[in-house]
Image (cartoon, rainbow, N blue to C red):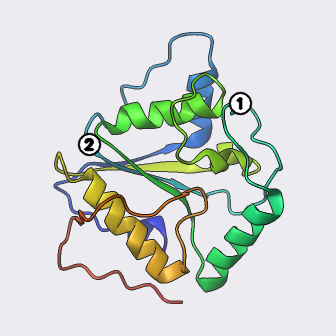
Amino acid sequence: MYARDIPWTAQYARKTVGMGDLLERAAGPARANWTDLLDVSGIYVVTWTAGAPVQFTAGSDRARSAVPLGLATLKAKWDRIIGEAPTDILYIGKGDNVKRRVRQLARFGVGRANNHKGGEWLWQVREIDRASVLMQSCPDGCQIGFENWLLEAFREVHGEYPLANRDGPEGSARWCPQPTHRLVTEK
């Protein structure tokens, strides 16, 4: 499953931003401008767009509040995921306000916040600034169901949840932009 496989229709906003840009904004000395991010409920997906294979570090770099996973454990998880099928997805998240959650993620990654524990293993990906963040809106109240649906779809293809997702679906809600859409990804 790739980020491009995530169902989307024109009635929902979609935008991709480079992780390096987000981290630069979060680390900058001045108050950052986040107005270009989606100010709606929805999901966000951190994708590996560097072209080179994913590599890991033992520590969490500037994300001081992150609790690193053992390097061998993290690498083994990634190897199992891509052993099932190739992917560019490192993490799937959701938010009542995507802009706020992505801003929190970036601030967490540069050590300026400790309020985004989800995805904390992202900061062990070497050159994480070469990743991208795909944001996609959904109707208010559907963000948990959308994330749940994506996590299950990912697990169906890869045998487990994305690299930096510690847990699976939250509750029983499920939602997808195209309810009849069946994810088909070659293994």
Above or below, comparing residue 150 to residue 18 in the picture: below
Q: Amino acid at mark 1?
A: Arg
Residue at x-position 82% and y-position 50%: 57
Residue assigned mark 2: 41
Closer-to-camera residue (82/15): 82
Label 1 and label 2: CA atoms lie apart by: 28 Å
| Mark 2, other Cα within 10 Å: few <14 / some 14–19 / many ≥20 | many
Q: Of marks 1 and 2, which one's residue comes earlier in the chain?
A: 2
Residue 116 at what x, y percent from top left? 52, 36
Question: Does any portion of residue 37 appear in the rendered image?
Answer: no
Above or below, comparing residue 167 to residue 122 in the picture: below
Q: In screen coordinates, is 3 left or right of 56?
A: left
Q: Amino acid at mark 2?
A: Ser
Q: In screen coordinates, is 135 left or right of 176?
A: right
Residue 28 at what x, y percent from top left? 62, 17
Front disc: 1 or 2? 1
Residue assigned mark 1: 64
Above or below, comparing residue 35 to residue 18 in the picture: above
Disc 1, SS? loop
Residue at x-position 34% and y-position 63%: 148
Return the residue found at the far bottom: 187
Closer-to-camera residue (169/21): 169
Residue 137 at what x, y percent from top left? 26, 49
Disc 2, SS? loop
Closer-to-camera residue (70/183): 70
Occupied quadrant, residue 81: bottom right
Above or below, comparing residue 110 to residue 162 in the picture: above
Disc tally is: 2
